[in-house]
Amino acid sequence: MLYADTSALIGAYLKDETDHLQLRAGILEGPDAVVSSELARVEFASAVRAAAHAARVGGQHELLVHFDADCQPEARIRLIELRADTVLASAYRLVLEHRLRTPHAVHLAVALRERDDLAELAELVFVTRDAAQATAARALGFEVR
């Protein structure tokens, strides 16, 4: 199972990203189930809006609709509920221990919680394009792609 951080999701959907083909193949077309935090939906919308403003993508609305369709139950990506009572305390510790930006720490905290819940079912591989987040994920015992 893959936990895709927003940076990886953006790379998978935006065709002008340098590693688009690799991320698309792994996240959207690969055999592994994909999960992410519901935070990704907000971050994704922000990134798509910025890309549209910079004329990197046309059809901002269509791209957001496509992403939302991929995040519906029984679709490609399962968005995990952001449970503030457990995630924020963990994200706080991760920010201090690994010098992460807030959204990166939140994604890692959600992945940690999910990994604990899925321990018997599948290995959770963390997918990110951020070097600091990848380093922290490895330190937490994740395989990183």
Image (tube, grey):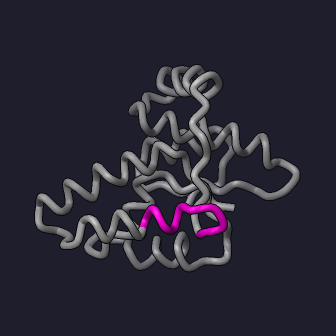
Q: Position of residue 38 (x, y in %)?
A: 51, 45
- The answer to whether 113 is drawn above or below residue 14 in the figure is above
Residue 72 in magenta stretch: yes
Q: Position of residue 119 (x, y in %)?
A: 82, 48
Quarter placement of the C terminus: bottom right
Residue 10 in magenta stretch: no
Residue range highlighted in magenta: 67-75
Q: Is residue 6 left or right of residue 116?
A: left
Seen from this angle, which residue lies furthest right? 120
Q: Position of residue 58 (x, y in %)?
A: 18, 73
- The answer to whether 50 is drawn above or below residue 63 in the figure is above
Q: Is residue 54 left or right of residue 32?
A: left
Look at 53% across and 61% down and name the residue there. 71
User: Picture quarter containing residue 136?
Assistant: top right
- How many marks overall? 0
- The answer to whether 90 is drawn above or below residue 53 in the figure is above
Q: Position of residue 50 (x, y in %)?
A: 19, 54
Look at 56% across and 39% down and name the residue there. 108
Seen from this angle, which residue lies furthest left? 54
